[in-house]
Image (cartoon, rainbow, N blue to C red):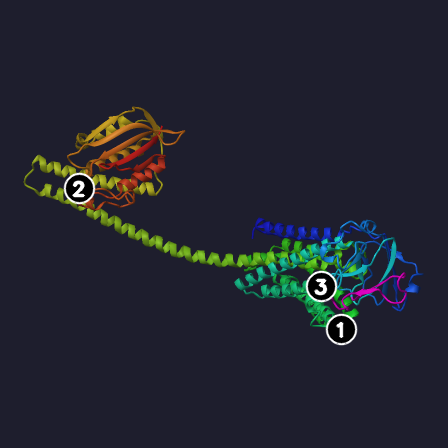
Amino acid sequence: MKTLSILTPFKLVLTLFHVLFLWLIICNGANAHPIAAQGYWEDPTGAATLPFVTHQNFTPYQGVLSKGFTNSTFWIKLTVEPSENAQNPQSPAVAEPLQRQASASDLILRIRPNYLDLIELYDPEVSAKEPLESTGDMTQWIATKPYQAIDHNLVLKQVTQSKTVYLKFKTLSTSQIYIDCQTPSEFIVSSNTLNFIYSATLALLLFFFTWIFVNWLIDKSTLNLLFVVKQGIFLSYTFCFFGYFRVYLSDVFTPQEINAFYNVWIQITVVSSMWFESRFLKLHQAPIWCDVMAKILLVWGVINISLIFMDTTLHALFSNMVLTGVGILMLFFAAFFIRSSAIEKSTIKQLQLEKWIIVTYYCIITAVVMVFVIPGLGLSKLPTLNLYAVISYGLSSGVLMTVLLHIRTRNIAKLRAEDAIALKLSIEQFEIEKNKRKEQTDFLHMLMHELKTPLSVLDLALHSSNKSPKNQQYASRAITDMKSIIERCIDTDQMQENKLIIKHESIHVSSLIEDILDTDEFSKSRVQLECEVDSDVTSDFQFLRIILNNLIHNAVRYGHPDEKVLIRIESDTLTQDHKSLLISILNAPGSAQWPDKNKVFEKYYRSPGAQKQSGTGLGLFLVSNLCKRIGVLCAYDPTPTHIQFKVWIPN
């Protein structure tokens, strides 16, 4: 497999991947109404009340808060400033559909990621005991709620001055939270943008899922089937991750049931991804320990799923995150230990990818996976983008692996095509041999037919007791005909075998024609030469002589015996920039009648009327091909009364 053939699809998919990544950065980083201050306080007991919390020391932070897997409850203190629209009530800050349920002085807190279980909003100025509002996976999704969106959001009503509120959140998944503060108009724009990006991401995943499914229909290999299953699972996981499952299933299942399903589906997604990646490496001669580790990871994943049903969801999700990190590192190192020599010696080399491609692929997906595993375990803090890194893994691995498997399927198709081509070539070779034998048979039949008449004439002349000059003339003519047949056969054979060597020289055309006529008194008496231009041309003397001799010979032989054959030499212009010498040879139709203009230059073609006279059917075929060899143009251009052949010689 050639490297260049791989690079083009790689560049294409990586470009698509980075473009989508850029969209996410722009969308996630856009905070048109920044939060003045934010800090967090960890409550290990989960029993703290708002009056107690307000007296605690909050740790300032920016961007994403990542605390890993913990049983603690976290309190976030936010200080927000009123929007400009709140200070200028006449400004049309709110879109028409929301004007009946919103105020220009409202602020909306958009909270991500979507898998957080419960987030509560507290305002000390309103109530010290009860939350003003709550959201999260464990709350019911209500379509009629003001500012409802696919993400979690909380509304701060009538913010006309600097305000401090508290958020309390707890989740059984990794404790990561990112908060945007937006005006109603900003919220509408960002919601539409996010919906577009989410839809585009799902559409892209669906496109590549369909692509590889079609490849599987072409090449029903186990690897392609595993990838179809893996991508199908990840596609549905992405649908859940973006929060669509809450929107479409809230009327059918309770929030607790939906959340439980999502937690199980996370485990299945990781297990299916790891199993597919390990099978992919095994196909490319990965070390034995990689296969052993893959089976251990599979058992590990099954245990994690069982922990969900044992009501230890936090431990199951933590173990699943560790499994993801360990698994991707195992795949990363295994890629470097692929036995490239085994690939080179393998009989199915064309079904496998080069080692550097596989290593590059695992370097990319390892980097992407670690972007969400490390902060997910609470080991470091990364930008907002890490909230979507798990989806980035699905996109990068899905897109790149789709291309790699497509290349593999293409190689399989190439092998099949090569087999088909080999079979086709065998059939074509058989046809060539068959046609060659047919041509040889046709050639022998032509020789027998054309030599029969002159041989009969010669035989009659030799055995006749009358040795008159007329009989001797017949015998001489018969010998000339046989020599002409043999010469045309030799010339045609040399031309087809590419044995003719072109030698350019200056040629005086009118002298060449007169020389041809001088060799045949009969032809000379029948020909009328009109020379309007008497000039030299540069061409191959011998080939040009053969061309003109054949055309003149045909005109005299098959033309009307009572009509002169006209040869006209004149100047002509083929194109605007190239002048040429035009030789026209005209004769009135004789017993051979008019030739078929579509077949006149075909090999062995003779008009029905010409069958009564000796000939090979090679003359005009030879003329046409020799003209092409020496750069001369020959055409059959009959007039209403005459058969006419034209020859243009570049001057």
Determine crowd level at label 3: few under 14, some 14-19, many 20+ residues with C-alpha closer than 10 A: many
Whichever of labels 1 and 2 marks the residue nearer the N terminus, that label is: 1
**Circle 1: residue type:** Leu
Q: Which residue is mark 3?
A: 243
> Dividing the picture into quarters, in which one does residue 596 lie?
top left
**Circle 2: residue type:** Ser
Residue 331 in percent (x, y) is at 69, 61
Q: Is residue 621 magenta?
A: no
Would you say residue 372 is visible in this rendering?
A: yes
**Circle 3: residue type:** Gly
Q: Which mark is residue 184?
A: none
Q: Is residue 11 above or below residue 135?
A: above
Q: Which residue is mark 2?
A: 591
Residue 249 in percent (x, y) is at 69, 69
| Marks 1 and 2, how far apart at CA | 103 Å
Q: Is residue 61 above or below residue 548?
A: below
Locate the C terminus by quadrant: top left
| Marks 1 and 3, how far apart at CA | 24 Å
> Dividing the picture into quarters, in which one does residue 215 lie?
bottom right
Determine crowd level at label 2: few under 14, some 14-19, many 20+ residues with C-alpha closer than 10 A: some
The magenta segment is: 117-144
Q: Which residue is mark 1?
A: 307
Q: Give yes or no for contact between labels 1 and 3 (Cβ–Cβ under 8 Å).
A: no
Q: Main secondary structure of the magenta part?
A: loop
Foreground residue among 388 and 119: 119
Q: Secondary structure at mark 1?
A: helix
Looking at the image, residue 571 sits to the left or right of residue 306; the answer is left
Callout in the foreground (2, 3): 3
Q: Is residue 452 above or below residue 215?
A: above
Whichever of labels 2 and 3 marks the residue nearer the N terminus, that label is: 3
